[in-house]
């Protein structure tokens, strides 16, 4: 599949039970729910030559204690 081919967007609704389970399972794989569903769809369709947009999630970390203390000392 050429990267310049047009892509299609698919929308569908799921119920609250499915949404809850989807969120839990996607978190197990460190993915967003949309990424997990797309990966499942590609797997079921046998599409393995196209990447499922698997991007690493960055978790926000608070300031380190030393940096926080240093920042506080400049404000005083």
Image: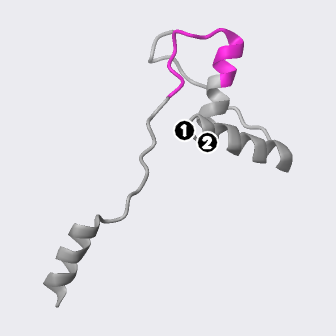
Answer yes or no: is residue 14 visible. Answer: no
* Colour convention: one colour
> Which residue, given by chain and number where applicable, does mark 1 sit on?
30
> Which residue, given by chain and number where applicable, does mark 2 sit on?
27
Please indicate whether residue 21 sits to the left or right of residue 30 in the image.
Answer: right
Tell me where residue 21 appears, x and y as whole percent.
77, 42
Please indicate whether residue 53 sits to the left or right of residue 70 in the image.
Answer: right
Which quarter of the image is occupied by the C terminus? bottom left
Residue at the outermost bottom position:
76
Query: In the image, what residue occupies the spot 46% across and 11% down?
Result: 2
Q: Residues within 10 Å of mark 1 (few under 14, many from 20)?
A: some
Please indicate whether residue 73 sits to the left or right of residue 63 in the image.
Answer: left
Judged from the image, the secondary structure of the residue bearing numbered disc 2 is: helix
| Residue 23 or residue 35, whichever sits in front | 23
Tell me where residue 45 appears, x and y as whole percent.
70, 12
| Residue 9 or residue 67, whichever sits in front | 67
Q: Are marks 1 and 2 in contact (CB under 8 Å)?
A: yes
| Residue 73 or residue 6, whichever sits in front | 73
Residue at the outermost front position:
65
Tell me where residue 51 appears, x and y as whole percent.
50, 19
Q: CA distance from mark 1 to mark 2?
A: 5 Å
In the image, residue 62 above or below residue 9: below
Start and end of the magenta stretch? 40-53
Answer yes or no: is residue 24 visible. Answer: yes
């Amino acid at each position: 599949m050429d990267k310049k081919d047009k892509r299609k967007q698919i929308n569908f609704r799921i119920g609250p039970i499915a949404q809850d389970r989807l969120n839990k399972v996607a978190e197990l794989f460190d993915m967003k729910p949309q990424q997990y569903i797309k990966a499942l769809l590609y797997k079921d369709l046998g599409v393995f030559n196209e990447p499922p947009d698997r991007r690493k999630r960055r978790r926000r970390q608070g300031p380190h204690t030393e940096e926080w203390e240093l920042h506080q000392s400049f404000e005083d």
